[in-house]
Amino acid sequence: DTGVSQDPRHKITKRGQNVTFRCDPISEHNRLYWYRQTLGQGPEFLTYFQNEAQLEKSRLLSDRFSAERPKGSFSTLEIQRTEQGDSAMYLCASSPRVMGEAFFGQGTRLTVV
Amino acid sequence: GQQLNQSPQSMFIQEGEDVSMNCTSSSIFNTWLWYKQDPGEGPVLLIALYKAGELTSNGRLTAQFGITRKDSFLNISASIPSDVGIYFCAGQLARGATNKLIFGTGTLLAVQP
C-alpha cells in the first residue's frame, strides 16, 4: 500500500500523559500536513512541513503540541500533558506540490480519559 | 478555526436520485477540492479543481470551480447506497504564503435503497 500511513489508529490515554503519533507520507511527497477533526466538524489545520522545515503552525497548536519531520520523511506529532479537550481524530496528509491534491491517512483517534 | 460554508448540512435521498451540494467563501481560492469521509476513516479525495470556471467529472461525480473563485459545487448523479458518507469541500487561499486547506462544515448524505 503506497498511501499515507498513520500509527496508531486508536489511542486511549489518561489526562496528563504524553502521547506521540506517527505519520508516513506517500513516497516523494515533500509536503506534509497535520489536521485535527472533532465530531461533526471538518478537519482543522494544525501545521505544515515542506521537507524537514516546519513552515506554518496554527494558533490551535498550543505549546503542549510539537511536531517534527526529521530528514523530511516521516513525521511525529507529540501532545504533552494531555487534556480531555485534546480528544479528537488527528489526520495527516501529504502532497507532491504547493497547490493541489492532499492525500489523507486513516487518522489516529485519541481519547483522553 | 476558519471553516467554509457548506450546504446543505444533510441530505436524505432515495437511491437513483441526483444530489447537489455547494460551498461558499468570502475569500478567493486558488484550488478547490472535494473529499468523502466514512465514519472512523480519513477523507478520500474525489475531485480537484484548479481554474475558475473549470468543470471536472469523476464517474458519477461532477464538480465546478466557481467563476468568482469564491464557491464550488459537487453533483452526484444516480446515487447508490455506497455514496453514503460525509462530503467535505476544501480550498486553498489565493493570497499569502499559506498552503493549508480550509475545510467546509460537511454535508451528510444518506441514501435509502
Image (cartoon, coloured by chain):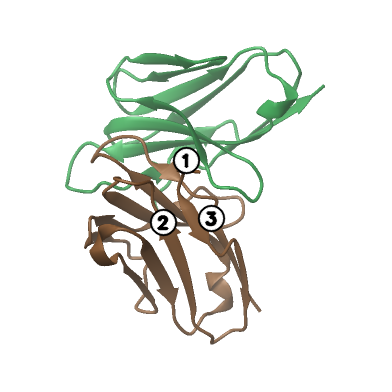
Chain colours: A brown, B green
Q: Are marks 3 and 2 in contact (CB under 8 Å)?
A: no
Up the image or down, B51 lies above or below A41; here it is above
Whole-percent x, y for residue A105 in the image: 49, 49
Q: Picture quarter containing residue B78?
A: top right
Compute the Cα span from label 3 to label 2. 11 Å
Q: Residue B104 carries which label?
A: 1
The reply, left or right, for residue A113 in relation to residue A61 is: right
Q: What element carries label 2?
A: strand
Q: To which residue does mark 3 refer?
A: A107
Point 68% across, 18% down: residue: B79
Q: To which residue does mark 2 refer?
A: A24
Q: Is mark 3 on a helix, strand or loop?
A: loop
Whole-percent x, y for residue A35 in the image: 43, 56
Decide: few, some or many residues near mark 1? Use Cα within 10 Å; few <14, some 14-19, many ≥20.
many
Report the amino acid beneath label 3.
Gly
Report the amino acid beneath label 1.
Gly
